[in-house]
Amino acid sequence: MITSLTEDQATAVGSAPAKMKAAVYVGNHTVDVCEIDTPRIGPGELLVRVEACGICHTDLKKIEHDLLPGPRIFGHETAGTVVSTGEGVTNFSPGDRVVAFHHIPCGNCFYCFRKLYAQCPVYKKVGITAGYEPAGGGFGQYIRIMDWIVERGLEKIPPGVSFERASLVEPLNTCLKAVMQLDPQPGEVCAVLGQGPIGLMFTMLVDRTGARVFATDTMGPRLAISRKVGATETCDGRMTTEVDHFIRAMTDGRGADLVVVATSGPGLVEQAVLCSRPGARILLFAQTSHKERIEVSGADVCVAERTLLGSYSASVDLQKLSANLVFNGELPLDKLISHRVPLNQIQAGFELALHPDEKSLKIIVEPQRWS
């Protein structure tokens, strides 16, 4: 375990040090902050100095449940500065500020033709690494961005936009993709279950469609923020009678037209069915574990003609739109960032993300900072 930063770490790789610090997942639920070699790049690739990387629950699940073997360096909500470029790179130069997507599809397969990009075999490959098996790398100080990501998976950050705000582009893209699949219409009522960072993004995006948002969470401060960013009504999700009362009151007794299940937990999908009307569209967004089981009445789906939808990961088609929504300030995304942690305190950031308190929302790792 590294306990202090050194100023000069031997020979430089381009204009980067030969050694760097990274939070390395070593297996057995364990992440160590270690000194490792700075990645070396090849033709068509970029070396980027990571300035901000959001903590995402998909990475935490991989660590908590040992879903992948170590060593790996996770972190995929990444923003930073180009340090050096490989042979043949013409669209980027050292000093460019960029946000990077770690998955990009091939564009030419069965799934890509149907715009199911997350099912594309090339999309499933990770194209960014800080070392070891590619896993995103944002929890390291430098990342190597591979050629197919350089070609289609980067957006330049405009002047005046902070790195931490730019790091929200990837998660916002995943929410925007889901909202476009759900297709809210003006005047419809959409229940968003969960008002963590992702749930709040859903609230903002659904609100801008003209649909009305009913939001639930178990933490009062999150519901207060929800009302500020677009929710018409809010309620503690544990108060099932009150949830039903509010939604019925908003819909002339019918139930929600749409439901987004933006968090995972026992009974949430069942609640989504119960609070929705016949013919409703229900989107599962946070149900990413193969171990999670859902039990609902078949008749509640079949006879009541409800539609269950799934949405996972980002869409390359929405890359520029999602970046513009973050960069232009249209959405109050700064309200989502509650904590910023230096690299040597990343474990505390993980713990807070796994066990949030009433003040915590999005946690940003700053790999270049040590205290």
Image (spheres, helix red, strand yellow):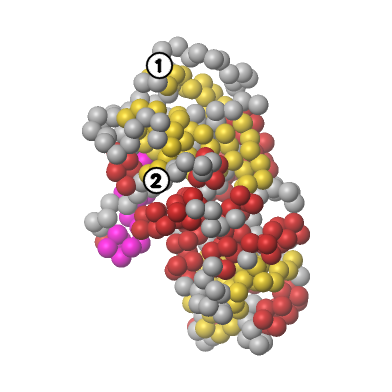
Q: For label 1, count other residues whose C-alpha is less than 10 Å away and answer few (under 14), some (14-19) or many (20+).
A: few
| For the residues bearing labels 2 and 1, Cβ distance under 8 angstroms | no
What is the distance, in whole Å, between disc 2 and disc 1 at their CAs? 26 Å
To which quarter of the image does residue 346 belong?
A: top right
Residue at 37% across, 44% down:
154
Q: Is residue 299 magenta?
A: no
Identify the residue at horizontal 32%, vertical 30% (top origin).
85
Mark 2, residue position: 155
Main SS of the magenta part reads loop
Against 206, residue 83 (above or below) is above
Query: Does residue 256 lie above or below 107 as drawn?
Result: below
Q: Residue at x 56, y 74 (%)?
A: 211
Q: At numbered mark 1, what does the secondary structure look like: helix, strand or loop?
A: strand
Question: In front here: 186 or 348?
Answer: 186
Residue 71 x, y percent position in the rendering: 47, 31
Position of the C terminus by quadrant: top right
- Across and down, in percent, residue 279 comes to 52, 83
Q: What residue type is labelled 2?
A: Glu
Magenta residues, as a range?
A: 111-127
Amino acid carrying mark 1 in the image: Ala
Q: Tell which tag, 2 or 1, sits nearer the viewer.
A: 2
| Residue at x 40% of width, y 43% of height | 156
43 lies above or below 150: above
Question: Which quarter shows the N terminus?
Answer: top right
Q: In which quarter of the image is residue 349?
A: top right
Relative depth, front residue between 188 and 295: 188
The reply, left or right, for residue 305 in relation to residue 41 is: right
* Dot 2 alpha-carbon crowd within 10 angstroms: few under 14, some 14 to 19, many 20 or more: many
Measuring from the top left, give residue 236's x and y in whole percent. 74, 66
Q: What residue is shown with label 1? A: 12
Q: Is mark 2 on a helix, strand or loop?
A: strand
Q: Which residue lies most toward the front here?
A: 160
